[in-house]
Amino acid sequence: SLVRLEYHAAEDERVEISETCRIAVDFLRWTLGEGKNDSNEERPEYDAPMACACMLSPYDSIDPAPPHPSHASIPTPTLGSTLRNPSNPLFERYRIMFSLRNRGTKAAVVELCETLVGDESSALLRHEI
């Protein structure tokens, strides 16, 4: 249940469990169109849009955080910098990671590799990359 996931996202001392539950909570909120973050602030990037081509995985995968349509117009290095910023919510970083993966360009791979090697904030994020 959402309540149980929220509990583990906030209270579980095992970071991997807490982060996994946080992503699940944010995905469910996105799916339900709740559009709020932990601070109960409006987060337009959580609004669940109708699916667009930029959100579809070319790898036939089901991702825990869908790419955001606005990422299509953001330069790859900017997405990479945002991905590596640990102050951004993990769900947002995951959305960026999948946007970069879906681009499939050499520049996108470089950004993902830099995150894999340089990120120290989330073992879960590095694992997903």
Image (spheres, helix red, strand yellow):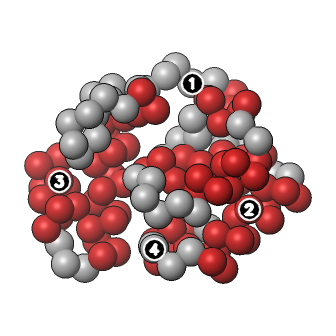
Q: Is residue 63 visible?
A: no
Q: First in sequence: mark 2 or mark 3? A: 3
Mark drawn on residue 6: 3
Q: Looking at the image, is mark 1 or mark 4 earlier in the sequence? A: 1
Q: Position of residue 53 (x, y in %)?
A: 69, 28
Mark 3 or mark 4, earlier in chain:
3
User: Disc 4 marks which residue?
Assistant: 121
Q: Disc 3 on helix, strand or loop?
A: helix
Give how far apart the Cα atoms at labels 1 and 4 are. Answer: 30 Å
Which residue is at a point 47% across and 63% down the rendered structure image?
86
Label 1 environment density (alpha carbons within 10 Å; few <14, some 14–19, many ≥20): few
Q: How many marks?
A: 4
Residue at 58% x, 57% y: name it. 83
CA separation, marks 1 and 3?
26 Å
Residue depth check, mark 3 versus mark 4: number of the one nearer the observer: 4
Q: Nearer the viewer, residue 86 or 48?
A: 86
Where, by quadrant of the figure, is residue 12 drawn?
A: bottom left
**Label 4 sits on what residue type?**
Ser
Give the amino acid at mark 3.
Glu
Q: Quadrant of the C terminus?
A: bottom right
* Disc 2: which residue: 111
Residue toward you, 19 or 79: 79
Q: CA distance from mark 3 to mark 4?
A: 20 Å
Residue 115 position within the rendered picture, expressed as x and y whole percent measured from the top left: 64, 69
| Amino acid type for the residue under numbered disc 2 | Glu
Q: Who's the residue at 30% across and 76% down the image? A: 15
- Verify CB contact (< 8 Å) between mark 1 and mark 4: no
Vertical placement of residue 101 versus 67, above or below = below
Image location (x, y in percent) of residue 58: 73, 44
Q: Is residue 19 left or right of residue 83?
A: left
Task: Tell which tag, 1 or 2, sits nearer the viewer.
Answer: 2
